Every structure is written in structure tokens, then in C-alpha cells.
Amino acid sequence: MKFTKLVHAALALAVLALSALALSSQPARAHGERAQEPFLRMRSVQWYDLKWEPTEVAVNETMTVSGKFRFMPASQWPLTLAKPEIGFLNISHPGPVFVRKASFINGVNAANSTSFELGRDYEFEVKLKGREPGTWHVHTMMNIYNGGALVGPGKWVTITGDRADFTNPVTTLTGETVDLEFYGLANSLLWHGIWLAIGAVWLVYWLSGRMFFSRHRMVAAGRAEELTTGSDRLVSLVLLAVTIGLVIGGYIWAENKWPITLPLQSARQAIPPLPDETNKVKVELERATYRVPGRALQMKIKVTNTTNTPVRLGEFTTATVRFINPVVGPQDESSKSYPDDLLAEEGLIVSDNSPIAPGETRTLDLTAQDAAWETERLSSLIYDPDSRFGGLLFFYGADGSRQISDVGGVTVPQFI
């Protein structure tokens, strides 16, 4: 008896504790991009020159997310990840807080899936219309067929105003203007209600007054035919006739009300990449180690400048984290609005910052060091079965030019 009371008391305390946690918990507003394996984030898609403009909009106002991305070359692309032969440029945010109004890749409408090439760069622009007031984490994202979602950098943006003021008007091909926020809602609720009602009648009829165990014993005894009565057959035929009649009648009604319809478009389009400007500064990785105590990736690289101007290494980007060489400093406007937690402004140490002359080959020691290796869960790279990294190196010329070279290879952990 005492044991039973103790069990009841423990269960009551557990219920109270869970209720308190539920009442005090807050909704999750950010995403789980840090849960993605480091090799996916480092060796698949590299995003750069990103902008979120503006970072505060009112309901019904438009924000633009723009920038560029590069698919890592085949030598770096993970073997376990499907190649981007079918991909879709997407934007990730917590629910329908924005409405996507338009998207472009290299100036081409990107409403459909696209074929991409490894090792090439693309420029994009996505226009989002504010819908739900609040502060939201907005990410770039690339969906790969048979590969899943590859999440890019995210930035907090704010939507102000009143949710009730949101409208989403569009003009159809027949000249009619409708509000997509509520268009077809009543019709959808009506048909859902009809099918739910039919399903409820069917379940109530077959479950009321019919004991499962007694019917199971009859089936086991070979008397299954006795379970179905003439009334059962009549009810079944009536519901079947009603269902078929609703389907046919609904089809005829829809054809008469909307005589002009177009099917959902599922075609793919091939968008040519940006002009190939890679390898003007050639980079060869000689060695890479990840120093666990210092949270630092150390690289020895051989750099050959094949351009016509002296260049200096200014940045290393991997898995959305930007390691900046403080001697050179940020050279692009997008760094001013880049998420602070992903920007290591003094995170890249270069052994020799003097300009690399045209035609010169030089060996450089690099150290990309910042707490972001831990906060972004990139340090778990050393525990992967395929412990390889990937990223982009940004070289800046004396004439203001910029050259982007990919780098990657095996990483050896160093624990002391």
C-alpha cells in the first residue's frame, strides 16, 4: 500500500514538473544547422558576399537576400552526398513568417529546380515579403535531390506591424486579382469537412457495439462470414455511392467553375554558371592539422600567383564561418552586415603578408583560429570517418581585384 502511494506521488511530481517546463519553455526560433556534420558544411556549398537588406521590415514590406555560392569541386565533394544535378535554391526560416515573391540565379528566374556544376560559382537574389511579426533567423539553403538540405549562414531579421494587415494579392493569367492568403480557403475547409464527416460515419458505424475480442474469436473459429450482415453491406454500398458521386460531382463542378487551369510545373532548367575565374591564384595544400586545445586549423599551402598583379591573402571561409586576416582586413561591403557570430575579424594568421608577385610561388603557413570552431560544432570534424575539410581562400590584388581559390584535404588532429 505504501509502495503504491509512493508511486502515485512520484507520478504526480513528474506531471507537475513536466507541466512547469511546458509553461516556462519558449518556442525555438533558430535552426539546427549546427547539427549538420562538418564535412557536409565544409565540402559542399560555400556562400559568400551575402546580404540581408534590410534587416527590419514591416508586414507586407519586402526584404532581399542576395549573394553568391560556389559548389566545391569534385575532388572535395563528399562521396556520400549526391551531386547537385538537381537542386533548388531555398530560404530557411521558422515557418511561413515570410512569403517568397521571387528568386533569381544569375538573373534567371529560379522558380524551378536547377542543374548545377561542381566547382562553379552562381549569383542569387531572393525577395521575401514580411508576413508574421517577430524576430526570425533567416538562412540561405540549397536543397539537393537525394542529398537533402544544405543550410547556409543565418541572420536575425525583424518583422514589425500587425499580422492581420498581411495581404498577398496576385493577378491571375485570366486577369482576376485574388489574395493568396485566403484564396480557396473556404473551399478547402468545406471538402475537408465533407471527407471527415464521411470517415466519422464509417468509423462510428463499424465500431459501435462491436467488441474486438469476440469478433476475433469468431474469425479464429472460421465464422468470419457471419460478421457481415445485410445492413453492413447496405451501409457500405450507400457510402461507396456517396463517395463516388462526390468525386465525380466535385470534378464536374470544378471544371465548370475554373475552365482554364494549368498543372503545377515540375520541369528543370539549366542555368549557366558565372564565368570561370578560378585557379588564377593556384593553391596546393601540403599539410593540414586541427589543434584541439587551441581550436585552430593550421595549414601549409603553396600559392602560385598567375595573375598580372601582386596579391595578398585576406580571408579563409568554411562552413559559413569567415576567418579574416587583420593585416589585410575585410575588403567587401557584405562583411559589415555579416552575422557577428560567424565573422572572426582577426581569426586568420598568415606567416607572410607581403604581396605575392605575379608568377611567384610561395609557401604560406596559415592558422584559422576562433571559438567558432566549437560554437559551430566544426571541431567534431576530427571524429568523422572521412576527416577532410574544405573552404575558400580570398586573395586581393593591388589593383582592387579579388581571386577566390578553393582549398581542402585531409586534416590530422593534434591533441597537445
Image: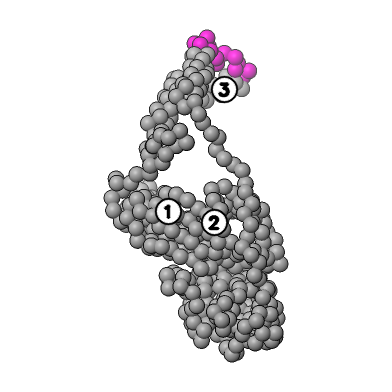
Please name the colour scheme applied to the rendered image.
Answer: one colour
- Residue 286 is situated, as x and y percent measured from the top left of the image, at 70, 81
Q: Disc 3, disc 1: CB below 8 Å?
A: no
Please identify the quarter of the rendering in which residue 388 is found.
bottom right
Which residue matches tag 1? 128
**Nearer-N-terminus badge (3/1):** 1
**Nearer-N-terminus badge (3/2):** 2
Which residue is nearer to you in this view: 342 or 22? 342
**Nearer-N-terminus badge (1/2):** 2
Specify whether 6 is left or right of 125: left
Q: Amino acid at mark 1?
A: Leu
**The residue tagged with tag 2: helix, strand or loop?**
loop
Q: Which mark's residue is nearer the viewer, 3 or 2?
A: 2
Residue extent of the magenta highlight: 221-234
- Residue at mark 3 to residue at mark 1: CA–CA distance: 61 Å
Q: Residue at x 49, y 82 (%)?
A: 329
Which residue matches tag 3? 217
Q: Which mark is residue 61?
A: none
Which residue matches tag 2? 107
Q: Which mark's residue is nearer the viewer, 3 or 1?
A: 1
- Residue 137 is situated, as x and y percent measured from the top left of the image, at 42, 60
